[in-house]
Image (cartoon, rainbow, N blue to C red):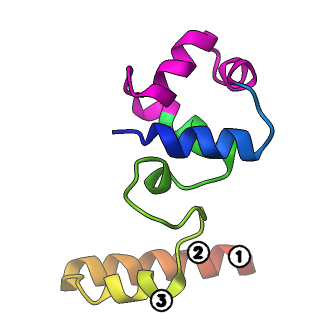
Amino acid sequence: MLNGERLREERIAQNLTQEDMAKKLGITRQAYGNYETGKRDVDSQTLVKLAITLDVSVDYLLGLSKNKNNNTDKNSVLNNLNDLNQEEEMLIKLIISSWRKMKTE
């Protein structure tokens, strides 16, 4: 569930009104206000729009992370790679190889 307090804090920090946010999302000011008060939960598409508009991570808006940053820490990504099975590891290597080849062409 969306953390309305974080949403409010980020909106205010960026000098945006509820009306500004509603216009950016294509909804009414009342509907947006309900996100901040927790009276209405947000769908996944709107959640992504909120994160992009406020330049914070979805996890931050959901209260799952204290990290506002959209960029994932490289070390945490690398630590998660240790949990891959052999098939997943091969797929990641194939993707990286294809990406590198595409960049050099």
- Quarter of the image holding residue 8? top right
Quadrant of image for the N terminus: top left
Residue receiving disc 2? 99
Tell me if mark 3 has few (under 14), some (14-19) or many (20+) residues whose alpha carbon lies within 10 angstroms of its own.
few
Q: Please report the residue visible at 47 percent of the width from the left and 19 percent of the height from the top.
A: 34
| Residue found at x 53% / y 80% | 73
Do we see residue 16 in this rendering? yes
What kind of residue is marked 2? Trp
Contact (Cβ within 8 Å) of mark 1 with mark 2:
yes
- Which kind of residue does numbered mark 1 sit on? Lys
Does 94 appear above or below 28?
A: below
Q: Amino acid at mark 3?
A: Asn
Report the Cα–Cα distance between label 3 and label 2.
21 Å
Q: Residues within 10 Å of mark 1 (few under 14, many from 20)?
A: few
| Nearer the observer, 80 or 97 | 80
Can residue 76 be found in the magenta stretch? Answer: no
Q: Is residue 38 magenta?
A: yes
Q: Which residues are magenta?
A: 18-46
Residue 27 shows in the view: no
Q: Which mark is residue 103?
A: 1
Please indicate whether residue 102 sits to the left or right of residue 45 in the image: right
Q: Residue furthest right?
A: 15
Q: Quadrant of residue 14?
A: top right
The residue positioned 42% from the left and 88% from the top of the image is 78
Q: Residue at x 53, y 72 (%)?
A: 72
How far apart are labels 3 and 1 at the CA level? 24 Å
Image coordinates for residue 74, horizontal then vertical, percent: 53, 84
Q: Which residue is disc 3 drawn over?
A: 75
Which tag is nearer the camera, tag 3 or tag 1? 3
Quarter of the image holding residue 42? Answer: top left
Q: Position of residue 105 (x, y in %)?
A: 74, 76
> Helix or strand or loop: what does disc 1 sit on?
helix
